[in-house]
Amino acid sequence: MFYVHCVTGNPYYGTNDFSNNGDGTVRDLATDLMWEQGDYQSSDFDDAVSHCESATTGGYNDWRLPNVKELQSIVDYSRAPDYSNSAAIDPVFTATSFPNENGATEWGFYWASTTHSNTMGTGHNATYVSFGRALGYFEDPQIHTLSMDDVHGAGAQRSNDKVSVSGAPASSVNLGYGTFYYHGPQGDILRVNNMVRCVRDIP
């Protein structure tokens, strides 16, 4: 049995109505949030938080790391790496690409400020949202060999250890493009570095 909790709010949330401010910032007219146009690679959760808190993009000094719902509001589900050869975000934003664990052009997982409680009830993990493939490395039951697939897709929410994925209960492998970690029944891939896009509230 599942339960439903109803809520009212902004009916335009997530409609991707963006305005380029011309100063490295983008305004979302649907949510009235301001976003950094560019992104930043972060080695861990604390670094992501610190980066946003010290950012001065556009002359503003009240940037913060977005929560997971705010990040999901800027996902563009009409875009995806295997469909549009781009990140799942409006092209008004800059999205850094890189070779993924299988050598294909990829776009990142973006840190959120939202903590993910694990099965032990601790808050060691932080959520992130995928703006590229949400890859998994797992055994294909048909051919009984490990393979890589986009198991969740762009816009997926997952979580990473806040400090270091190398210390998480995960396996590691290198397919020729650098060591990566994976865990869980679908072999969710964990990256040492995730991306950051800061946000601020418009007064």
Image (cartoon, rainbow, N blue to C red):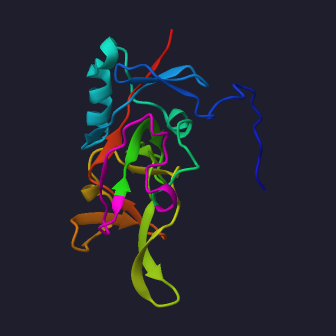
In the image, the segment drawn in magenta is: 82-105
Residue sitting nearer the eye, 175 or 44: 175
Image coordinates of residue 74 in percent, x first then y, are: 53, 37
Residue at 53 percent of width and 32 percent of height: 70
Number of numbered discs visible in the structure rendering: 0
Q: Does residue 144 show up magenta in the picture?
A: no
The answer to whether residue 36 is above or below residue 44 is: above
Q: Position of residue 17 (x, y in %)?
A: 58, 29
- Residue 31 visible in this rendered orientation of the protein: yes
Can residue 169 be seen in the rendering of this structure? Answer: no
Seen in the picture, residue 9 relative to 133 is either above or below; the reply is: above
Identify the residue at image location x=31%, y=12%.
59
Helix, strand or loop for the magenta stretch, by majority = loop
- Residue sitting at the far top: 203
Residue 41 position within the rendered picture, expressed as x and y whole percent measured from the top left: 27, 42
Quadrant for residue 37, please give it: top left
Q: Is residue 194 above or below residue 185?
A: above
